[in-house]
Image (cartoon, rainbow, N blue to C red):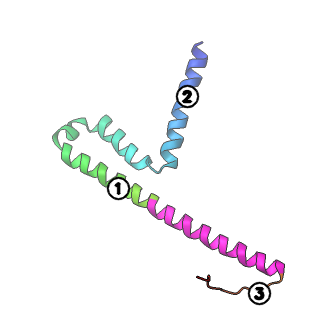
Amino acid sequence: MAYLLSRLIIFIVWIIKWGVIKSRMFIPSLFIAIVLLFFGDWYAANEVLANSLLIVLTTIVAVSWIFTLINKLKYLKRQHRRDVEYAYKVAGEPIIATKKAK
């Protein structure tokens, strides 16, 4: 029973670690761990500064998510355009930009 429990705990820790790394929250999480474990007195004395640093780190991560989303959408749009051009090329029809009739 203890073996299964230890395996379950290791699995849960692995899932959390994987999620933190994939979400790019590794550096803010590392900052929290280091400050709370090694600099508890400093954190108590400079709580506003430490929380501000954490907010800045988290904001940088959020901005990186936004840039990643924008780049992914641009990539999908380019890929769709290439697929359409290839389909026209295979069909043997010229690519003509037409306006929709009102």
Q: Position of residue 73 (x, y in %)?
A: 55, 66
- Whether residue 90 is situated above or below residue 16 in the rendered picture: below
Q: Is residue 18 magenta?
A: no
Graded by Cα atoms within 10 Å as few (under 14), some (14 to 19) or many (20 or more), the crowding at tag 2 reads few
Q: Amino acid at mark 3?
A: Pro
Which residue is most to the top? 1
- Please name whichever residue, 90 or 37, is drawn nearer the observer in this view of the structure: 90
Sequence-wise first label, 2 or 1: 2
Q: Is residue 79 magenta?
A: yes
Graded by Cα atoms within 10 Å as few (under 14), some (14 to 19) or many (20 or more), the crowding at tag 1 reads few
Q: Which residues are magenta?
A: 66-91
Residue assigned mark 3:
94
Q: Secondary structure at mark 2?
A: helix
Q: Position of residue 16 (x, y in %)?
A: 50, 37
Sequence-wise first label, 3 or 1: 1
Q: Nearer the viewer, mark 3 or mark 2?
A: 3
Q: Secondary structure at mark 1?
A: helix
Q: Amino acid at mark 1?
A: Thr
Query: Residue at 25% of width from left, 51% of height from top?
Result: 52
